[in-house]
Amino acid sequence: MTLTEVNYYFRKLAPFVAIGLFFLVIFYFLIMALFSSITSNRSSVPIYNPIFGKITKLKTLSKIDYPQNATFSLDTIEGKPISASDSAKVFFMPQKPVRFGYAATSLLIAKTLDFDTNITKYTSSEDDVTSISFEDDEKKLKIDISNFNFEYKLNYENNPEIFSGSTLPNDDTILEDARQFLRAINRYPDELARGRQEIIYLQFEPTINDFIVVKTPEEANIAEVDFFRSNIDGNPVLPPKYFNSQNYVVMIFKDQNYKVIKSQIKYFDFDKQNFGIYPIKSGDEAFSDLTSGKGIIVSSGKNNNQISINQLLFGYFDPDSIQDYLQPIYIFLGKNGFAAYVSAVRNEYVE
């Protein structure tokens, strides 16, 4: 075949080749789009693994009654409740048995808190077999012998003079002294060490025999350090009262020394490897639960029965009493210090 004939047939067939390549390219992109759509749909289907079945209802000792005839309104930038993800982890919180050797550990804690354990013996109650108590004329101590959570309080109401002359050091010193105290009684869990720690400035008011919150350290003669758990999957773990932790140390300072007048640790371990994946309510469903009285109000603030919600968060609830599960919650924050929690797990998965 001559060069002229080759050129002739090439020009004759070129349009058909171009059309064929054009349709081949279109077919390729259609197949890729279809595959991408199928893959996307598969990945968007939430994967649940509710291994615990129905979980127990969220509870707290800090629950506040709903105001009579309460009404709620939304005053958020979005104008509607924002939903969290389709699913979240629910962690198992195993209940621990009474620990072997609890007496020796409890005596050590009591001695660290200046109890004369040769004179002051611990007592127990038939109604609460997991706790023992120490008490003398100046102070009280209660220890949970299954996990060594404790409540300690100096009887400062009978001795208000102890607050005279107390001046606060800098914040770094306050924080380190609180940590040192918890280390000394061996009750400073890693999660509290990794979590945020906040100082609340207080002043003792003798007319009411109690503390009041003040804005600056110069106004205060008492410091409270609150310890919060570290985040879970980037979500905050929030205490029963939202603004205050159930894990705290309250101190006065004199002559560069600190004295603990009140402290409490209510910390419960959970199994980080033993969790289920549960379906989560939408923001609308959670708000409906709040408005119908199914939420848990943890701070009423300075509100009447008309409550304006201006922020909605998602996190986990850090319990103040032993529960079976560490579970996710929606947090509704309102004007004038209002805060409420709603279980985020869908209602059909809650007992």
Image (cartoon, rainbow, N blue to C red):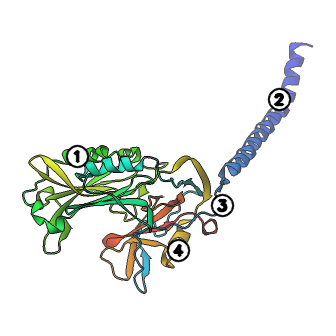
Q: Residue furthest right?
A: 1
What's the residue type where badge 3 is placed? Gly
The residues tagged by marks 4 and 3 sit, at their Cα atoms, a distance apart of 21 Å
Badge number at residue 177:
1
The residues tagged by marks 2 and 1 sit, at their Cα atoms, a distance apart of 86 Å
Residue at 51% from the left image edge and 79% from the top image edge:
292
Q: Which residue is mark 4?
A: 289
Please identify, in this view, whether the residue under mark 4 or under mark 3 is nearer the observer.
3
How dense is the environment of label 4, judged by Cα within 10 Å: few (below 14), some, or many (20 and up)?
some
Q: Is residue 255 left or right of residue 196?
A: left
Q: Position of residue 149 (x, y in %)?
A: 38, 55
Please tell me which of labels 2 and 4 falls first in the chain: 2
Please tell me which of labels 2 and 3 falls first in the chain: 2
How dense is the environment of label 3, judged by Cα within 10 Å: few (below 14), some, or many (20 and up)?
few
Q: Which residue is mark 3?
A: 53
Which quarter of the rendered picture does the C terminus lie within? bottom right
**Could you say whether the residue bearing mark 3 is in a helix, strand or loop?**
loop
* Observer able to see residue 245: no
Question: Vertically, is 73 above or below 327?
Answer: below
Question: Looking at the image, which is closer to me, 23 or 111?
Answer: 111
Question: Vertically, is 62 above or below 147?
Answer: below
